[in-house]
Image (cartoon, grey):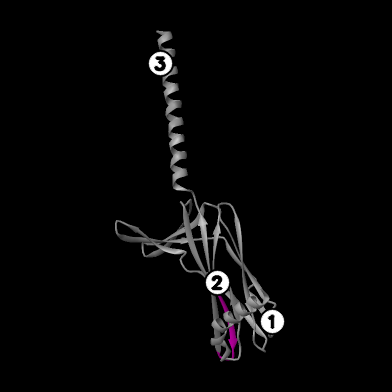
Amino acid sequence: MKVVYKLTLALIFLIFVFPLSRAQVGVGIWPAKVEVEVPIFKTSIVEINFFNPTEKNVSLEIEFYCRNCEEDVILFGKKICKRIYDLDVKISPLYLELQPKNLNQSQKVFVKTFNPLFLKSWFKLRAFGREVKIPFVAPFFDEKGFEYRILAGIQEKQLKIQIAGDVLFKFKGIEKLSFLLALCVVVLALVIFFKKHVESEFSTYEKLS
């Protein structure tokens, strides 16, 4: 198993480190892409590992951003505004120091998120010549994916080199079928309550008359 593990790491380095090796610096990242399901009211943590296969110390500056947290809102075929999701996603640490040839000892970056069910968002639109942001919260149904990109930057003389990894968070929302069934039960309960109330009022009226 150790042999297979080392061969796998060697393949990862060939793919992700080779473009950087010509600049005499390098870094490996694993996994390069990961998908994580985030159930309702649960916290999920992802580990991204960085390796330094070269003979030189490497200082990494970590950045991350959401690739699809902003979407157009379409009404009657026309774009009326943008919706921006304000997710609870944190990454740490933001700086790493990788020692030379640490193939067996990786440095980890942790990406943490929480699914509150009611997602915070902003409506961004232009009104009266000004940009306006309207905050709101709303539940969502079934599943919604948010794509995050992690960038590790190396400053080498006048050149900044970056290597990227992708994290896809699949937020689990309310199941439509369960929601519809619950809604039907509530409506049925209200109908039964209203019927009983009317019958009670009618019975009281008959007794008085």
Separation of residues labelled 3 and 1 (CA atoms): 84 Å
Separation of residues labelled 3 and 2 (CA atoms): 66 Å
Nearest the viewer among 98 and 85 is 98
Is label 3 in a helix, a strand or a loop? helix
Counting residues from the start of the chain, the first of labels 3 and 1 encountered is 1
Residue 64: numbered disc:
2
Q: Are marks 3 and 1 in contact (CB under 8 Å)?
A: no
Amino acid at pointer 1: Asn
Counting residues from the start of the chain, the first of labels 3 and 2 encountered is 2
Question: Which quarter of the rendering shows the C terminus?
Answer: top left
Answer with left or right where residue 81 lies relative to residue 2. Answer: left
Q: Residue at x 58, y 72 (%)?
A: 31
For label 1, count other residues whose C-alpha is less than 10 Å away and answer few (under 14), some (14-19) or many (20+): some
Residue 69: where, in percent of width, then height?
Answer: 47, 64
Separation of residues labelled 2 and 1 (CA atoms): 24 Å
Amino acid at pointer 3: Phe
Residue denoted by label 3:
202
Amino acid at pointer 2: Phe
Residue 73: where, in percent of width, then height?
Answer: 38, 59
Residue 101: where, in percent of width, then height?
Answer: 68, 85
Q: Which residues are magenta?
A: 149-158
Q: Residue at x 43, y 34 (%)?
A: 187
Which quarter of the figure has residue 165?
bottom right
